[in-house]
Amino acid sequence: MRMSLDIVGKNMIRVDALSKVTGKAIYPADVYMDNMLYGKTLRSKVPHAYITVNTKEAENIDGVIKIFTCKDVPTNEHGVVFKDHEVFCSKKVRRIGDPIAFVVATDIKTCDLALEKIKVNYEEIEGVFDPISAMKEDAPKVHEGNNIMYHYKLRKGDTEKGFESSYVIAENTYKTHMVDHAFLQPESGVSYIDEEGRVTVVVATQYPHYDREEIARALNISEDEIRIINASIGGAFGGREDISLQIHLALAAKEIKRPIKVVYSREESFISHSKRHPLIMKYKTGADKNGKLLAMEADIIGDTGAYASWATNVLRKAGVHATGPYYIPNVKVDSIAVYTNNPFAGAMRGFGATQPPIAYEQQMDILAEELGIDPITIRMKNMFKKGSETATGQILTESVPLEECLNKVLEDMDLNLDRKGAY
Amino acid sequence: MKRIGRGIGLSFYGTGYGNGFPDVSRAKVRLLKDGNVGIYVGGTEVGQGARTIFYQIGSETLKLSSDNISFITEDTSLMPDSGTAAASRQTYNTGNAIKIACENFMDRLREVAKRELKLNSTQGLKVNNGKIYLEFFPRKVISFKELAQKQKGNVIEAEGEFVAQTVEMDSETGQGAPYWPYTFNACGVELEVDVLTGKVEILKTRFAQDVGRAINPHLIEGQMDGGFAMALGYVLFEDLNINEGRIKNQKFSKYLIPTAMDMIDLENVIVEDPESTAPFGAKGVGEPVMIPIAPAILNAIYDAVGVRITELPATPEKLIEAIEDSKEGRVVKHG
């Protein structure tokens, strides 16, 4: 029985709507402070190289206050799961866009001039750009150790037997590409020392307490000495989970003790933050004569680029969701994450569960066509219902209205497509 | 020549951090000096509508108008950690934490009211519309404002914490309970493929999303529209054009995302089946709304022109090439 509620279930107007549509909402780039300086980041122009950096000439430019490099950071690392990012690259760059130095100057033009005058000597090394090549023993290593950085295994029943009993088997390889979150507000922030002496960073972030934790670690100060103010945020979609400019800004404010502002250009936003993992998904799906699914095998390889970010969790999630919302008695999934010298991949809306349906839902249609049944019948036969068991052995005890969802679609769209002899 | 096709996509999605990792949200509720209520919570509004949902959950639980509630969700020096605005977890996880904190806060109010009203017990004390009163003798009543003014420096506040339940999977077999709750959806798409230009035009969609229970139907429809648009770009045109680690399409003049011109009015259907562990039954939908769209479009393209696009994106060039190949009987699948 449903409770009768006063406001839950009502279309309350968004509490942030008025300020956003009237342009009054404050995004970090809207913040200006007295005595404020500007910061810009020097980024790697090559995907894989040993580097040496000389900032001397740039430091002598009028208006340059300070140039930060790896030697200025007490703990020069960060990362949401593994601390495999450096705040500033020390010996090696692993992707185009890796941060190398951070210039603070009185104005943006001076920052740009200083970036040009910083000398980076790149000793290029062979890179690896495709995850299949990266998995080979003799492939160039992106980090210490193997490029294969995660392997999720899912085993249920006996797939060999399942395929033996199958009347039809569909085998196909599907590939998805790397895409950007394309949030509308590029990264920006302002840092300063507040009235209580705290290192304060105004930023647009998905998780302010995580930013505080990473700043505390990198600067080797306590979390109480740091304050994150989360301003208005122009979209995120997972692209604001990793650290971008937070540590650079905090470090600069702590050392210089003046407000510092950073605004990324669209191009810098594209080359600096994470992407969606491209997956290669090799699928084999078998069904009996009536369309009942009997076995499914999936080999999934994900390119996480130069850094781990959320690769372990994303490839795990891809593996867990590889069956689709269908009961299959025999399942074998291997889902692997691999380092390359591509832009790094991380969180993005759907987090590894967005790619597998490209495969499993086309597999369903292919099986249906081969069996001469329609796409709806095969789905109705196999779909999760209340009480179903997933491939990981979890029981869906309640709130499983998938059949109702499909019926709602069918109410106003004929999808019982008969494709016999169509092509 | 244009050909019309229809396709279906179904998906499921496990929300929350998952896999046994502690997924904790916290909230703090305080009676302010003016009798209004402050709720302190580290959940971020990224555009998904979390702040509005927090107001609705807080207002519903406290039986208090949202005009009398202030949310503080921006400053780490003031608010407890409520986890990340990700994993479609703010409505379910932080919503639960807010509800628990508000319930604890009402218990605190009843205790203080018992003392102020000189009662023997908190039994029968109702909290409604900014007042605490004895239901069967309503003259025994005190407002939030009077209560706040009588405290003289003593702060009336309460905390709430919600920890989601998942079970870590076995490292060899993957057996476990990695997520909870799951959400489900189905999307049907009708589209038109121009076989000469390879251009795909969406004609009609019917998109049904399980939400547990809708806290704010308009915000859910907003998520469904946005998820559809994002998936449309993903499957048909977004391409970074990466060569040896270099992104060539690094600005919006080259990296094409959908505009209003690419969208149609979606037929969105909200399906309710309340989840018992969720605040008022509501599950997270931020991510799932993107997931069934791409396969529905790919299946509809096949229905229209008989080619399977197995490698994204399904750009006009790729579609024309696949259509030409299929005419010559070479390959039907195309990657």
Image: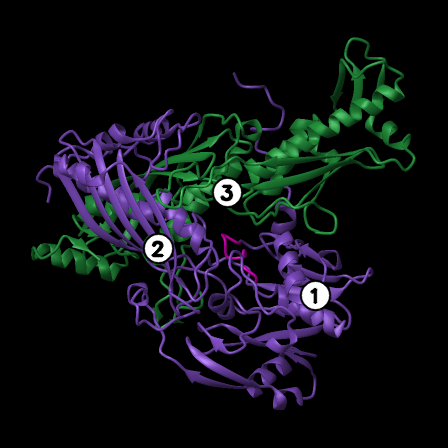
Chain colours: A purple, B green
What's the residue type where badge 3 is placed?
Ser
Q: Looking at this rendering, what residue extends furthest in the top direction? A: B136
Chain letter of disc 1 in the image: A
Disc 2 secondary structure class: strand
State left or right for residue B93 relative to residue A330.
right
Give the extent of the magenta segment.
A236-243
Q: Is residue A324 above or below residue B150?
A: below
The x and y percentages for residue A373 are 16, 32
Chain letter of disc 3 in the image: B
What's the residue type where badge 1 is placed?
Ser
Q: Are marks 1 and 3 in contact (CB under 8 Å)?
A: no
What's the residue type where badge 2 is placed?
Ile
Disc 3 secondary structure class: loop
Residue A69 is at least partly visible in this image: no
Q: Which residue is mark 3?
A: B88
Residue ID at (34%, 69%): A129
Q: Which residue is mark 1?
A: A191
Tag in front: 3 or 2: 2
The x and y percentages for residue A229 are 69, 55
Tag in front: 2 or 1: 2
Report the predominant secondary structure element of the magenta stretch.
loop
Q: Are marks 2 and 1 in contact (CB under 8 Å)?
A: no
Q: Which residue is mark 2?
A: A336
State left or right for residue B238 relative to residue A232.
left
**Residue B314: quadrant of the picture:** bottom left
Query: Any magenta on residue A241?
Result: yes
Q: Is residue A102 above or below residue A301?
A: below
Q: Nearer the viewer, residue A41 or B104?
A: B104
